[in-house]
Image (cartoon, rainbow, N blue to C red):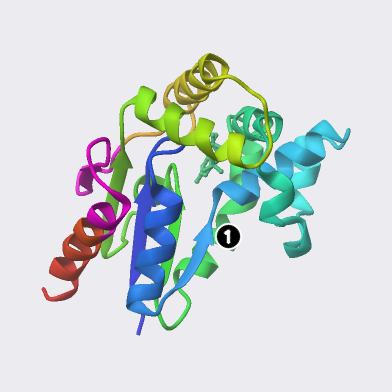
């Protein structure tokens, strides 16, 4: 059985948490496509030209724990604006999406560019302030001393770059269900996501 769930949205809206829970609920495989761009961004910071890094990306470079820093996030959104970088990562994402047994992909352009034929599409969003608060808590828990104002400025800068780039800008697909998690608990957001996807499965 092939069934693709596309989950897009801006940074720290809850995509990752929702995607993992949705994948577990349906028994599907999950790909956090942001890791691909983060891995290329990290290599750029290490001096590798980004297009070359994207074209030679290896699975062992996708170590989430090493790619979570704010510097890598900003580098990721810079390399993500380079069309040749995006092009080099398309085949891997599409192959993952069409695997037997079902797949959940989360990112920025899954429902619009990578998998426009996905059976279910969600656009997970929240206000910049709520997203910055969540990211700030995460960073503080991980031992970072970055202040809230810096995190909010980072979130807004990355949003602007992701939404205004020419190639595959961040926006909801016309047929995506928009889920605003600003006022929702994690459990509520997951329940609403599962309900929206289940309604597509039954058609
Ligand atoms: O989701 P995450 O914050 O890990 O993504 C890091 C950056 O990678 C984003 O800010 C965005 O610029 C880029 N990205 C993208 N397309 C995707 C996933 C991530 O452009 N499908």
**Image quadrant where one finds the C terminus:** bottom left
Relative depth, front residue between 149 and 193: 149
Give the answer, above or below, for where 77 lies relative to 30: above
Residue 104 position in % (x across, y down):
41, 65
- Res 101 quadrant in image: bottom left
Residue 33 position in % (x across, y down):
54, 52
Q: Residue at x 80, y 43 (%)?
A: 52
Relative depth, front residue between 121 and 127: 127
Magenta stretch: give its range: 172-190
Q: Residue at x 33, y 34 (%)?
A: 171
Q: Residue at x 44, y 82 (%)?
A: 100
On whether residue 175 falls in the magenta region, the answer is yes
Q: Is residue 95 visible?
A: yes
Q: Residue at x 21, y 43 (%)?
A: 178
Is the residue indicated by label 1 positioned so its CB lies within 8 Å of ligand 1? no
Q: Quadrant of ligand 1?
A: top right
Q: Is residue 169 visible?
A: no
Circle 1 sits on which residue? 91
Residue 119 position in % (x across, y down):
26, 65
On whether residue 27 falls in the magenta region, the answer is no
Give the answer, above or below, for where 84 lies relative to 117: above
Mark 1: which secondary structure? helix
Residue 150 position in % (x across, y down):
57, 16
């Amino acid at each position: 059985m092939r069934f693709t769930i596309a989950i897009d949205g801006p940074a720290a809206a809850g995509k990752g948490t929702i995607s993992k829970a949705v994948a577990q609920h349906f028994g599907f495989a999950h790909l956090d496509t942001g890791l691909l761009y983060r891995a290329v961004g990290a290599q750029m910071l290490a001096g590798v030209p980004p297009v070359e890094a994207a074209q030679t990306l290896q699975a062992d470079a996708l170590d989430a724990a090493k790619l979570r820093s704010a510097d890598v996030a900003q580098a990721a959104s810079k390399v993500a604006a380079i069309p040749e970088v995006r092009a080099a990562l398309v085949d891997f994402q599409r192959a993952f999406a069409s695997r037997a047994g079902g797949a959940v992909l989360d990112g920025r352009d899954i429902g619009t560019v990578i998998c426009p034929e996905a059976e279910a599409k969600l656009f997970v969003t929240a206000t910049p302030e709520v997203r910055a608060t969540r990211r700030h808590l995460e960073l503080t828990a991980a031992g970072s001393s970055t202040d809230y104002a810096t995190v909010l400025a980072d979130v807004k800068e990355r949003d602007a770059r992701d939404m205004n780039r020419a190639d595959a800008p961040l926006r909801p697909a016309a047929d995506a269900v928009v889920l605003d998690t600003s006022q929702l608990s994690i459990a509520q957001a997951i329940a609403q996501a599962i309900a929206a996807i289940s309604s597509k499965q039954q058609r």
